[in-house]
Image (cartoon, rainbow, N blue to C red):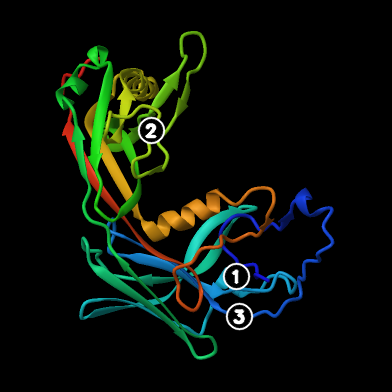
Amino acid sequence: MKVRRPLGPIITLLISSHFAGCDQAVNLDAPFEKKLVVYAVLSNRTETQFARVYTNYSGVQGTMDSTRYGAMDVTMTVGQGSRTYVFTDTLVAGDSVNGQAVWTRARVAHQLSIEEGKPYELVVSSPSLGMVRSKVVSLFRGEIYVQNPESLDVPTAVARIPVVVTLGSNAAAYILRFYLEYEYLLDVTWYSEKMEVPWTIVGGESEAPKVTYPSLLARGQRAPISPRGSDGVIFPGSAYRYTISQIRAQFPGGNARLKRAIFSLTQIDYPMYAYYSTVNEFPGAGTLRLDDPDYTNIQGGFGVFATQREDVMTYVLSPGLGP
């Protein structure tokens, strides 16, 4: 019998009606083995990497303090070549409850830059729970190509904005986002902000338009509007104009100016996508469904060790950009 493990979707144990007429009993008191659970996703966005390390727990026995505060007697390292980085204990603020911040125990490593296409090895050891390991190869660079970016300087003439991406060879999935960066004047100081451009927009004549924003796409999966034969997205010109109007509506006095179009490509690797898919695509109604996904690449334990990568392409908008 599987055991329930913390972190992930809300804890549920759903036994479908498929089992209602079955004579076979489900034994919730099967032998329980405590193991380490590790969640670590390395990213090139920062030199500071975070992870969670704790233990599984028996669903029959209820929750354990370690589900919130983490396993204490562990040593965690990530190695790359001849270099080894030690993750130390820290606290991370989560969502507040009744106005009070909820702190979660985590692990952190500083000055750990994730290089392109390099192997990384995770080792977590505990005197009481033994050692678990995992290996990944970091993602290769992705490329972003915006067809005719100069058209962005004339919003009224833009029908569509095709963006083609070339994924790294070891990327399993990606999400492509389009932002407009702008500055606004407050008192005597200019501040920088950005607003995301939706990838679909419907309506808007007599009522507020319905918009959707980019979501994760598997390699080769088509977005609602995609360039033919390529990974990527076509953003409607109407979505671009809508975003500009939203920015200007916040500053009716004209004290805002558009600066740059930013296209951000985030790739995730196969371990992360396998975990994501398992979380979001549980088996159908004829299965016993648990709170945590039935996927791990942690040898000897549970959880996931993976990488993600962000690559950015920017276009400086014309200072005289029209409405």
Mark 1: which amino acid?
Answer: Thr
Badges 3 and 2: C-beta atoms under 8 Å apart? Answer: no
Q: Secondary structure at mark 1?
A: helix
Q: Nearer the viewer, residue 34 or 50?
A: 34
Residue 111 appears in the rendering:
no
Mark closer to the chain start, 1 or 2: 1
User: Image height check: is 31 above or below 251?
Assistant: below
Mark 2: which amino acid?
Answer: Ala
- Which residue corresponds to mark 3? 34
Q: Position of residue 197 (x, y in %)?
A: 35, 29
Q: Position of residue 267 (x, y in %)?
A: 32, 50
Q: Which mark is residue 67?
A: 1
User: Image height check: is 308 above or below 241?
Assistant: below
- Which residue corresponds to mark 2? 223
Quadrant location of residue 272?
A: bottom left
x 40%, y 60%: residue? 271
Q: Nearer the viewer, residue 248 or 66?
A: 66
x 67%, y 79%: residue? 32
State which quarter of the image contains the C terminus. Answer: top left
State which quarter of the image contains the N terminus. Answer: bottom right
Q: Secondary structure at mark 3?
A: loop
Mark 3: which amino acid?
Answer: Lys
Q: How much space separates mark 1 and mark 2, taking CA atoms?
A: 37 Å
User: Image height check: is 165 above or below 40?
Assistant: above
Q: Position of residue 279 (x, y in %)?
A: 54, 54
x 54%, y 64%: residue? 103
